Image (tube, rainbow, N blue to C red):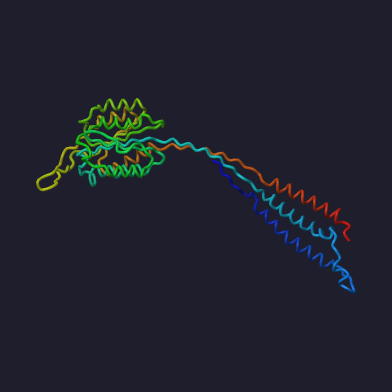
Amino acid sequence: MKLYEYYIAYPYALLLILLIPVMLIWHKSRNTNSSSSMLFSRFDLIANTPKSLKEKLVTAPLILRCLVVLLISIALARPQSFRSDENIYTEGIDIAMALDISGSMLAADFKPNRIEAAKDLTKQFIEGRRNDRIGLVVFSKEAFTQCPLTVDYHVLTDLLMDVSNGMIEDGTAIGNALANSINRLKDSKVKSKVIILLTDGVNNAGEIDPQTASELAKTYGIRVYTIGIGTMGEAPYPVQTPFGISYQKMKVEIDEALLNKIADETGGKYYRATSNTRLSEIYKEIDGLERTKIESTTYKSKKELFYPWAMAAAILLLLELLFSQFYLRKLP
């Protein structure tokens, strides 16, 4: 991309233009003082007398002189142009978000619960990205693609907010979630491919073993960031009773060893989120680690623009001398 900028190095030199009205006033005053008069008995004797070419050009030297001063003023101000050539290279990132929507994600240790907190903070993460393709995989007993890789974040976030528990039969298929996410990314040509997997449980469903899926991710050069969501110890889970929904304390079970191993083997990192605030911090850290790479190289070149003005001033000065000293010298 080429950008042109124009500058005047010495703008005070333009004050020389003020000499032009001074020259005009001086010329008028000089002609008034040196004028002579002749008496004619009849005005009509000279009224129709045609003017010669020399008489018509009598003010040409003054006009040329004024133009010379104008051009010299501009030349001394040294107009310059700067051309900037900027080469921008963008290296985007492909990200697959894998979100657990199993029944345990309804636990109320997050506000209002784990799944809603995860959706809200995932939305914030998506909206903070630029130039990256992001897709969404949801999983429970099975896994499916809620949204393929896209840069249309508006559509993506709408589909994210439509996610709810009960869309899939209950369970936790971490291996299937990874495999589905890998399938979204494996044919991508970008250098940086990432999976962010969020779950609150232990793998207990699906046809694909998480370890096998982890090795597959490594083969395709995909980094996996794993997030275990849930407080330490126990958390209140909603339970249907004859009198409505009540909350009972249940033990939080997250396979941290597995999530750690998946992250380590693929070059990612494991995080434990124990609150809304902590989950927000985790997303911010991942956002900082996985930023779009933008390189820009700027070249600047300066060009002096006073030469044409100076040349024009020299030509007009020579022309003024020719008029004054030769052509108009013998003007009566």
Which quarter of the figure is the N terminus placed in? top right
Residue in the foreground of this view, choosing between 216 and 289: 216
Q: Residue furthest left?
A: 242
98 sits to left or right of 32:
left
Q: Position of residue 275 (x, y in %)?
A: 25, 43
Reply above or below: 330 against 150. below
The residue lying at 72 percent from left, 48 percent from top is 310
Left or right: residue 221 versus residue 32 is: left
Q: Is residue 271 visible?
A: no
Q: Is residue 19 above or below residue 221?
A: below
Does 275 appear above or below 193?
below
Query: What residue is at 32 percent from the left and 32 percent from the top?
Result: 224
Q: Quadrant of residue 199?
A: top left
Q: Residue furthest bottom?
A: 41
For image coordinates 36% across by 43% down, the residue present is 153
Is any part of residue 160 visible from this angle? yes
- Total of numbered circles in the picture? 0
Instruction: Locate residue 225 relative to residue 299 in the image: left or right.
Output: left
Q: x, y (%) of residue 294?
A: 46, 38
Q: Where's residue 125, x and y in %? A: 34, 42
**Figure quadrant of the C terminus:** bottom right
- The residue sitting at 39% across, 32% down in the picture is 192
**Coordinates of residue 67 in the picture (x, y in percent):** 74, 55
